[in-house]
Image (cartoon, helix red, strand yellow):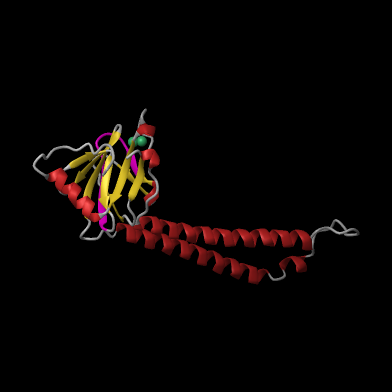
Amino acid sequence: MDPSHAGHTAATSTAQYDALFGLYFLIGAVVGVLVLSWLAVSLVRHRARAGDGDDLPGEDEDSRGRGLHVWIMVFGISGILFALAFGTLGTLHELEAVPADAHGVVVTGFQFGWIFDYDQGFRTFNELRVPVGEPVRIEVTSMDVFHNFAVPDYRIRIDAIPEKMNTLWFNATEPGAARVMCVELCGVAHAYMKATLVAVPVAEYDAWVLEQTGPSRGVSTAKGDPR
Ligand code: CUA
């Protein structure tokens, strides 16, 4: 499948990251509205009027209500930090808890492309095929320099480092093709280091796996239309 037409699929990780982004956005929006409102009110209430002298506010006026402001700031900022910390750690925990029954694929980056080695004992180049509705564990590494395996539709981004395995899992929630790209500057053809992730129904996936492991067992380049 042509990667330029890819980009209309989703996974459990999409929902998890979007929820976390929503939390950050909501808190940021609330703080932004509060700060700008306070600025607007202050501009109107404390503007210089005709007949005002140019002396600064007196000590009494300046310190009025300061104690309350401090407590609001302490609790407000603590609340925000705790919400963001627990939200982030919770999402990370979910993303790192790989289900025991997950399909396994070792992803190896190289200059310039991606190799996918499936648990069932076969390999594809620049196309990762996964079943819809079943968990998939990817273990990402590199055979030369640092790369980064990214699937924007799945909100996935994981370093591909030589002699190191970085693990992540996802569960495709709808069939379709997703763009895979390298997002670590890795050499002259970095921008062309693309692949396609194709999520297909389980029956179709199983038939494809049989095809790959059948009598004519060999290396599939998995090019062209996935059907
Ligand atoms: Cu590999 Cu950029």
Would residue 167 be found to the left or right of residue 5 on screen? left
Instruction: Tell me what residue is drawn at x 52 percent, y 58 percent.
Output: 25
Q: x, y (%) of residue 171?
A: 30, 56
Residue 28 in sight in this render: yes
Residue at position x 33%, y 61% in the image: 94
Residue 121 visible in rendering: no
- The prevailing secondary structure element of the residues shown in magenta is strand
Q: Position of residue 23 (x, y in %)?
A: 48, 61
Query: Which corner quadrant holds the C terminus?
Result: top left
Say if 23 sits above or below 107 in the image: below
Give coordinates of residue 212: x percent, y percent: 16, 43
Which quadrant holds residue 43? bottom right
- Position of 89 with respect to 206 (left or right) is right
Seen in the picture, residue 149 relative to 187 is either above or below; the reply is: below
Locate ligand 1 by image quadrant: top left
Q: Nearer the viewer, residue 198 or 35?
A: 198
- Range shown magenta: 134-150
Q: Where, by quadrant of the figure, is residue 160 drawn?
A: top left
Side of 184 where 222 appears, left or right: left
Query: Percent x, y for residue 38?
Result: 68, 62
Q: Residue at x 32, y 37 (%)?
A: 146
Q: Quadrant of residue 90?
A: bottom left
What is the quadrant of the N terminus in the image? Answer: top left
Q: Residue furthest top?
A: 188
Magenta-drawn stretch contains 144: yes
